[in-house]
Amino acid sequence: MRQTLEITVGRNDTLEAIFQREDLSLADLAAIRSLPGLRNDLDRVHRGESLTLVREGEKVLELTSRLSLAQSLDVTRSASGFEAHLIAIPLETRTRTLSAKIDHSLFEAMAAAGGHDSTTLALADIFAWDIDFVNEIQPGDTFTVTYDEVYDHGKYAEDGPILAARFINEGHEYVAVRYVTPDGHAGYYTPDGRNLRKAFLRAPLKFTRVSSPFSLHRRHPILNLIRAHKGIDFAAPIGTPVWAAGDGRVIFEGRKGGYGNVVVLDHAHGITTVYGHLSRFAHGLHIGDRVSQGNVIAFVGMTGLATGPHLHYEFRVNGVYKNPQTVSLPDAVPIDGTLRVDFLAKTGPLLGSLYPPEGPALVSR
């Protein structure tokens, strides 16, 4: 007898566990998983995900799985075995612009304007190289953001990428616009084509507070001596991922005195960064490895001379210690001159969405 099962994946569920629970043929599962390119997709089932199974006894006749918002997988049984087809799901995209004034927090202001947390985080990421969203956001700051909302059969599904954004922080204006190059690379730029991304992150982790700033005259909390603190301590829970502040190469990974577990990256042009008091290193990280900005290289700990969990971060230029929060950071690559006409044509309308009819009247940065 033919039967259709609608299954919601539970906590710690696997496809094999579902087949066993429903008394379905594990030989059929093995045959399905052996189809070219399907094993990884089928093994990545997540809690809350919906599966549709059509069965006849223990035999599987059809399996449908939603792989992503825009794509589903349909596996059917034929006379010659199982066949798989990827099916594109039609989605609707609606472009939206909203503005808000900050009274207490960026998250509250976004929510009050009808936005979602995902766009709040994306907005903070875009301007992270210019604005310290932990310490510099003030009541009265304002923002305008144009972004896509994605709908699945008329129902809101998720926020798409931010297309353009304007942030007023303490009277200074910051503007970003998204541009996709002909080869498909997306990035955020100023209206004149400068890359918003800097070559280095100001803070190489998500932290709760600066527990000890850069200082040449700090009393060491353990040694009780006046000793220069030539870096910044970012308080964060043990296990918090630590990112490479910029593209570089691992030149040290191991234990080093009061630093405890430490990673040192060489970024060329005389720049090195140091990450200390780590609990552990990223799996597979070795001396000589190349890393890109944002790659996880280690995890916060309190090894070495540390009174609590935090990351000790140093930024050195030709061996000279610099304050990571104030050192001038080089820009990433701007828009190529050959793309300038295309850039201006595509970003102009997006930038126009950020301004009221009377236009901007603030100091730009």
Image: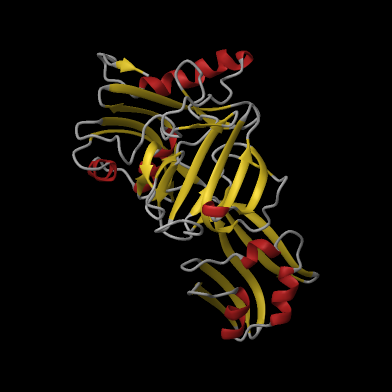
- Res 78 quadrant in image: bottom right
Quadrant, the C terminus: top left
- Res 218 quadrant in image: top left
* Placement of 353 over or under 283, stated as above or below: above
Where is residue 344 drawn, in percent x and y?
Answer: 50, 15
Where is residue 122 drawn, in percent x and y?
Answer: 42, 40
Front one among 59 and 142: 142
The reply to whether residue 153 is visible in this rendering is: yes
State the scheme by which the image is colored: secondary structure
Q: Residue at x 46, y 40 (%)?
A: 231
On screen, residue 23 versus residue 80, left or right, reads left
Q: How many marks?
A: 0
* Placement of 208 over or under 147, stated as above or below: below
- Res 149 quadrant in image: top left
Where is residue 132 drawn, in percent x and y?
Answer: 36, 36
On screen, residue 50 versus residue 101, left or right, reads right
Front one among 179 and 331: 331
On screen, residue 139 versus residue 216, left or right, reads left
* Placement of 220 over or under 57, stated as above or below: above
The reply to whether residue 154 is visible in this rendering is: no
What residue occupies the far front of the structure in this picture?
Answer: 225
Quadrant, the N terminus: bottom right
Front one among 85 and 20: 20
Front one among 326 and 358: 326
Where is residue 8 drawn, in percent x and y?
Answer: 48, 72
Q: Residue at x 30, y 15 (%)?
A: 363
On screen, residue 331 versus residue 228, left or right, reads right
Q: Residue at x 58, y 64 (%)?
A: 65
